[in-house]
Image: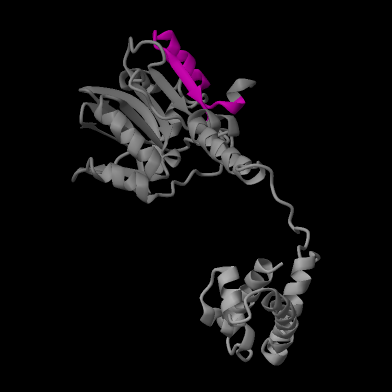
Amino acid sequence: KGMARVNPWLAAERFTRELGNGVNSWIGWKAPTFAQRVWVVPAMVLNNQSFTHQMERWIQAGGHLILLVEYSDSQTNDWGIEPSHYESNEALSAMLLKNQLVIKPGQNVEAEKIRFKRKSFSVNANSSSAVIFRDQKPSVFATTRSGQGRISILTDGRLFRNRWIGDKDHAALLTALIGENLGTGGVVFLRGSVMSLWGMLSTHLSSVLIALAVFLCLWLWKNFSRFGPVDTAAEASTLRGYEHHLEALGDFQWRLDRGHALLAPMRTQMLERGQHLHARSDQSADLFQILADRAAVPRDRVMRAMADEAPTDAASFIRTMADLQLLLKAIH
């Protein structure tokens, strides 16, 4: 009744606590610590390499793993008739094989006596899975040293469940396996492998915080201005300026007749002003020389600007136009 319907190891936990041992009862996986000396674990929990590697390190450092194979989960109905079947997995099988232990599903075994540390315990055990240690006969129980710790396998987990722990020497066997005076939190009863969201956050909180910090930095980098205010997507067009209209018109005229229409007005204006200047100056001097002296440019450049045909390329056209503008400015 009550908690006993949810926790099949409730009687075993209370009995262990009465022996003077600290007890932890968990429904989800947590990494074992060196302060814990004994773990009572259903075999189905150790179903991946992460769990088995953590357990192996703990055993090598002196921990005692009590592995229950069948009738070891909290969902099993102790008053039902449904048999419990063990399904092997590679991670657990590889860990046990290192210690010369093999669990054989589908092999019925039973026992009335279990020996541990030179003592014999009267039990009522039977299961459809057997455990084999080295070349010994298949049995319901096997144990071996592993590093500084120990691995014990009991294929019939009913011996320690609420309904049967009081039968025969089941409680005495549990006492022998666990030992006494293990200190606070020395014994752990694990009922399953369920892990809640808060449990995962407590274990991996640092990774979550790092991911959130990276996401926040990327969001700030994307949305905040880095080098002054953000420019508008569409800038105002600069083609409305008068000089750009002239540039467009000049480009059109250049492509149409190679610049003759652009140079003719400036040459006509330059010729009229040059003649007035020549009339006021020394008549013996050449017009081109007078303009060259006035603008401080070579005479041949003045001749090209005034008398040459329209330039055949853009570079020559630009030089000619620049010389005409310089001459106009000089005699203004």
Colour scheme of this structure image?
Answer: one colour
Please state the horizontal and vertical placement of residue 75, each as a whole percent of the image. 57, 36
If the image is split into quadrants, where does the N terminus sit? top right
Do we see residue 54 in this rendering? yes
Q: From the viewer's perspective, tell me whether residue 82 is left or right of residue 223.
A: left
Q: Quadrant of residue 289?
A: bottom right
Nearest the viewer among 319 and 303 is: 303
Image coords of residue 265 (percent x, y): 75, 82
Question: Depth check: 173 or 318 in front?
Answer: 318
Residue 15 place in picture, x, y as percent: 45, 14
On screen, residue 164 versus residue 259, left or right, reads: left
What is the residue that sits farthest to the left in this orientation? 135
Q: Does residue 237 lie above or below 222 as drawn?
A: below
Q: Quadrant of the C terminus?
A: bottom right
Q: Nearer the viewer, residue 214 or 243?
A: 243
In this picture, residue 212 sits left or right of residue 241: left
The span shown in magenta is: 5-27
Q: Using the rendered view, name the quadrant where residue 120 is placed.
A: top left
Tell me which residue sits at (64%, 89%) in the image.
310
- Judge whether residue 262 is colored magenta: no
Residue 8 falls within the magenta-colored stretch: yes
For the question of whether residue 108 can be seen, the reply is no
Residue at x 76% of width, y 73% of height: 246
Of residues 128 and 209, which is closer to you in this image?
209
> Residue at 31% across / 23% down in the picture?
121
Answer left or right for 125 relative to 256: left
Residue drawn where x is 42% and y is 12% of the image: 22
162 up-or-down from 264: above or below: above
The correct choice, above or below, for 132 with respect to 205 in the image is below
Residue 140 percent location from the top left of the image: 33, 38
Number of callouts? 0
